[in-house]
Image (cartoon, grey):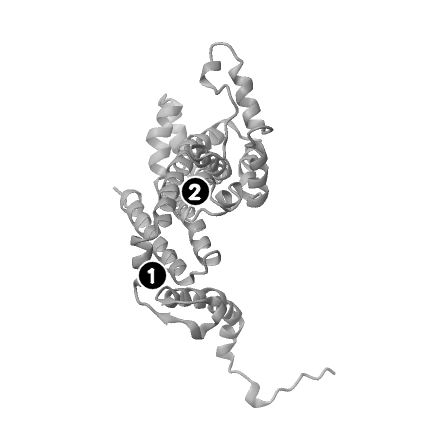
């Protein structure tokens, strides 16, 4: 005979409260590590605060942090330009390549499709630090494999003039953005390819069979059947790209050694925010920049929703 543990009546909860008890750990963790930092950053953006002096050192300044960031912080505008440049050059080509690539993988590969897709997806799940360190070695001016390959291509007849005759200094201002854009493109094109391939596989096969019977060519099938059906997924993928590109931090931070490179050409808004907070110790302005970045992301997402989200 087994004895059940007896609890005092005061400690017993009604049965209707049990589901809330089981899900309470999530809400407690979210409140501590999600909601509280969010609300605290709003308060912090309206105050001047020296973190080493404790919470009692907070001084109310209202919107002065926002005014300073928008009018007197030149680093914010230069980093914003770099961020938008990387968003256009590094992210837009991803979708222009991923869309036809996904359709090609869907059409050409049957048995080995999953293995090929896994190879394209591998860069996305690889550690960002490892990827950035490897590319730092590849982009080395004197010993990098990329410069060695470009110099070898320069020796080819007829087409050699298209490639540089001297090693490229990738850490220079004009080249730093291109280096980061190449890494971002290589890392995320596989992710977008998987998204579009999964959407293509949901298109009814009857449409492809009818197009084949009618003699429609593959590129016409892609333009007139696949692309219209992929509109919701394009909206989703572009939204993720907007959010990710405007928050870009790891790749430029590691590739430039945390400094932004020569002339701060590789310094993004997220890197500038980090520098203001943990290098300059100005957490109030850093919080204001974070919320300005949030407004920029919200506006860009709303514009994308207006262009791609509505059905025509």
Q: From what the image shows, is residue 54 above or below residue 159? A: below
Locate residue 186, reporting x and y percent: 50, 35
Locate residue 162, reporting x and y percent: 45, 17
| Outermost residue to the right | 1
Locate residue 92, reporting x and y percent: 38, 36
Q: Nearer the viewer, residue 182 or 169?
A: 169
Q: Which quadrant would the N terminus be assigned to in this image?
A: bottom right
The image quadrant that residue 294 belongs to is bottom left
Q: Nearer the viewer, residue 65 or 303?
A: 65
Q: Is residue 127 visible?
A: no
Q: Nearer the viewer, residue 38 or 58?
A: 58
Question: In this figure, which residue is indicated by the disc labeled 2?
Answer: 264
Question: In this figure, which residue is indicated by the disc labeled 1?
Answer: 65
Q: CA distance from mark 2 to mark 1?
A: 23 Å
Residue at the spot x=55%, y=89% of the render? Answer: 10
Q: Secondary structure at mark 2?
A: helix
Q: Secondary structure at mark 1?
A: helix
The image quadrant that residue 125 belongs to is top right
Q: Which quadrant would the C terminus be assigned to in this image?
A: top left
Locate residue 31, reporting x and y percent: 46, 69
Q: Is residue 87 visible?
A: yes
Q: Are marks 2 and 1 in contact (CB under 8 Å)?
A: no
Q: Earlier in the sequence, mark 2 or mark 1?
A: 1
Q: From what the image shows, is residue 97 above or below residue 240? A: above
Q: Nearer the viewer, residue 77 or 299?
A: 77
Please rate how many residues cluster around mark 2, counting C-alpha atoms within 10 Å: few if below 14, some from 14 to 19, many from 20: some
């Amino acid at each position: 005979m087994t004895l059940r543990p007896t609890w005092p009546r005061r400690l017993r909860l009604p049965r209707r409260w049990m589901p809330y008890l089981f899900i309470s750990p999530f809400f407690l963790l979210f409140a501590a590590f999600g909601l509280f930092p969010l609300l605290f950053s709003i308060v912090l953006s309206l105050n001047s605060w020296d973190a080493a002096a404790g919470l009692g050192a907070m001084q109310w300044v209202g919107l002065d942090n926002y005014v300073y960031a928008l009018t007197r912080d030149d680093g914010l505008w230069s980093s914003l330009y770099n961020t938008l440049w990387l968003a256009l050059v590094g992210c837009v080509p991803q979708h222009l390549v991923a869309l036809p690539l996904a359709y090609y993988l869907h059409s050409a590969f049957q048995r080995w499709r999953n293995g090929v897709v896994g190879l394209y997806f591998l860069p996305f799940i690889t550690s960002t630090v490892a990827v950035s360190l490897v590319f730092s070695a590849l982009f080395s001016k004197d010993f990098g494999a990329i410069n060695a390959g470009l110099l070898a291509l320069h020796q080819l007849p007829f087409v050699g003039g298209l490639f540089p005759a001297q090693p490229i200094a990738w850490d220079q201002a004009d080249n730093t953005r291109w280096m980061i854009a190449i890494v971002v493109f290589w890392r995320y094109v596989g992710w977008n390819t998987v998204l579009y391939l999964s959407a293509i596989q949901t298109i009814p096969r009857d449409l492809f069979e009818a197009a084949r019977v009618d003699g429609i060519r593959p590129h016409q099938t892609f333009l007139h059947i696949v692309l219209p059906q992929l509109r919701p997924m394009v909206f989703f993928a572009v939204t993720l790209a907007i959010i990710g590109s405007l928050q870009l931090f790891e790749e430029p931070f590691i590739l430039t050694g945390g400094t932004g490179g020569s002339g701060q050409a590789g310094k993004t808004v997220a890197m500038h925010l980090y520098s203001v907070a943990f290098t300059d110790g100005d957490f109030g302005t850093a919080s204001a920049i974070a919320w300005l970045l949030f407004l920029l992301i919200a506006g860009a997402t709303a514009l994308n929703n207006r262009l791609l989200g509505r059905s025509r």
